[in-house]
Amino acid sequence: MIARRAREADLEAWARMRAALWPELDLDEHRAEAVEALAADDVAVFVAEGPDGSLAGFGEAALRHDYVNGCDTSPVAFVEGVYVRPEHRRAEVGRALCAAIADWGRARGCVELASDALLDNTESHAFHAAVGFEETERVVYFRRAL
C-alpha cells in the first residue's frame, strides 16, 4: 500500500472519511477544514488508494511548535488523525500513512513524531503500538467555568 499527498480531487472522499473519524462536525465543516489543510504550509495530508482506486484511508499531520506532551524537541510532527475504511483495515494502510507522515516530518527537520488518543480508545492504542509509537504519559484534562 502506498500513501500519497492528498489533492483537491480527493476532497469529497476525504471529507467523508473525516466525518467518520470525527462525527461531531458535519460534512460541510469537514469539507471546509480539508480545503484549509490543503492550503496550509504546516499541515500535510496523505491518502491511500485501495485496489479499486477509491480512497482506503487518510492521515493528517501538522507541525506543532508548542509543547507536545512526552516530547523533548520542537517542532514536532504530530499525527492529528488517521482513518482507514473498515474494509481496508489490517492491510497495511495505516502503516503506510504513518510512514508517509514520518517522512514528511523528517524532511522538515523533526526528530520526533507524536500523536494522541482518548484514554478509552484501546483500538487506537493498539494501532499506535503496532506502527512503532511508544506511550509516554496519560493525561486527564479538567475544566472549571468562571
Image: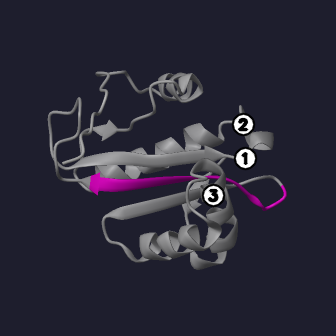
In this view, the mark in front (3 or 1): 3
Amino acid type of the residue tagged 2 in the rendering: Arg
Q: Which residue is mark 2?
A: 89
Amino acid type of the residue tagged 1 in the rendering: Arg
Q: Is residue 41 above or below residue 107?
A: below
What's drawn in magenta, residue-wise?
52-63
Q: Earlier in the sequence, mark 2 or mark 3?
A: 3
Residue 54 is tagged as none
Residue 85 is tagged as 1
Q: Nearer the viewer, residue 92 or 120?
A: 120
Q: Secondary structure at mark 1?
A: loop
Q: Secondary structure at mark 3?
A: helix
Q: Can you name the residue that lies furthest to the right here?
A: 52
Q: CA distance from mark 3 to mark 1?
A: 12 Å
Residue 116 image offset from top left, x and y in percent: 39, 35
Amino acid type of the residue tagged 3 in the rendering: Ala
In this view, the mark in front (2 or 3): 3
The verdict on residue 11 being magenta is: no
Residue 4 image offset from top left, x and y in percent: 56, 60
Contact check, label 2 and label 3, Cβ < 8 Å = no
Q: Quadrant of residue 10?
A: bottom right
Q: Which residue is mark 3?
A: 19
Residue 59 image offset from top left, x and y in percent: 52, 51
Locate residue 89 relative to residue 6 in the image: left or right. Answer: right
Q: Earlier in the sequence, mark 3 or mark 1?
A: 3
Q: CA distance from mark 2 to mark 3?
A: 17 Å
Q: Secondary structure at mark 2?
A: loop
Contact check, label 1 and label 2, Cβ < 8 Å = yes
Residue in view at x 48 percent, y 43 percent: 99
Residue in view at x 43 percent, y 75 percent: 36
